[in-house]
Image (cartoon, rainbow, N blue to C red):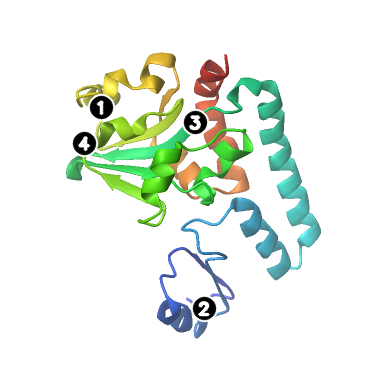
Amino acid sequence: MDPDLILGGFSVADQDDFDQLSKIAPTIAGLSDVQVDPWQDQVEILGRVLDKESRADEIVEATSGQIDALAQRLPGLKGKTALLSQYVFPTSQLVIVADPKDGASGLFTSLGMSLPPKLVEEAGVTGGRLMLSPERVDALSADVVVLLPNGGTLEDMMKLPGFADLPAVKSGGLAIVDYPTVAGLNTPSSLSLKYSLESITPQLEAVAG
């Protein structure tokens, strides 16, 4: 392998990783101190690197326009809360994205939604990703919950004490998604966002009223 460019993103953990990769080819690591950079920033930096800044601007404008159009169509989303999460059955671990600046939360904020403040405060010490035991299933108390039952099903989730009583479960705001959909939100790109957004639009509509 003889790459011309290495896009490392959050997988470049430290300066040593960056230095080693840079010996192979020019390397782009994380663009900020958040775990996942906003997709807009990623597109813009690639536009500069590939000398296609105009095309990058077009992509950002088109994708942002689609998200803005949905926000205008569903004004009831403004002020509601949302979470992206997965429950890993083999390890009985609940994982929640709880950093509003993280690129994985960007879609929700663009739609006028926010993350539950208590979770944001709790995650401030852990770097934006909360890893909780099943007893903390109440942490999924938000109007919209996008959840991957990793290694299980919705039926398995319903067996967890307290899950059936969550606001999103009762109001239609629970989106049980597959791996491609959650990955499209967790490590977003302009194309993956369109795919994933389509998957969770019914739940957004239900919550918007």
Question: Which of marks 3 and 4 precedes in the sequence?
Answer: 3
Q: 67 or 49, which lies in front? A: 67
Of the residues under marks 1 and 4, which one precedes in the sequence?
4
User: Do the residues under discs 1 and 3 have CB atoms within 8 angstroms?
Assistant: no
Q: Is residue 79 left or right of residue 171?
A: right
Pointer 1 and pointer 2: residues touching (CB < 8 Å)? no
Quarter of image, res 209: top right
Residue 197 screen position, x and y as percent: 56, 33
Q: Residues within 10 Å of mark 2 (few under 14, many from 20)?
A: few
Question: Residue type at mark 3?
Answer: Thr
Kind of residue indicated by mark 1: Met
Q: Which residue of the protein is positioned furthest toward the bottom in this rendering? A: 23
Identify which amino acid the numbered label 2 is placed on: Asp
Residue 68: where, in percent of width, then height? Answer: 70, 34
Label 2 – label 3 distance at C-alpha = 45 Å
**Secondary structure state at the residue bearing disc 3:** loop
Q: Which residue is mark 2?
A: 2
Task: Name the front one of labels 4 and 2.
Answer: 4
- Number of labels in the image equals 4
> Label 3 near label 4: C-beta < 8 Å?
no
Q: Which residue is mark 3?
A: 81
Quote the CA–CA distance across marks 1 and 2.
45 Å
Residue occupying the point 61% across, 27% down: 78
Say what secondary structure mark 2 lies in.
Answer: loop
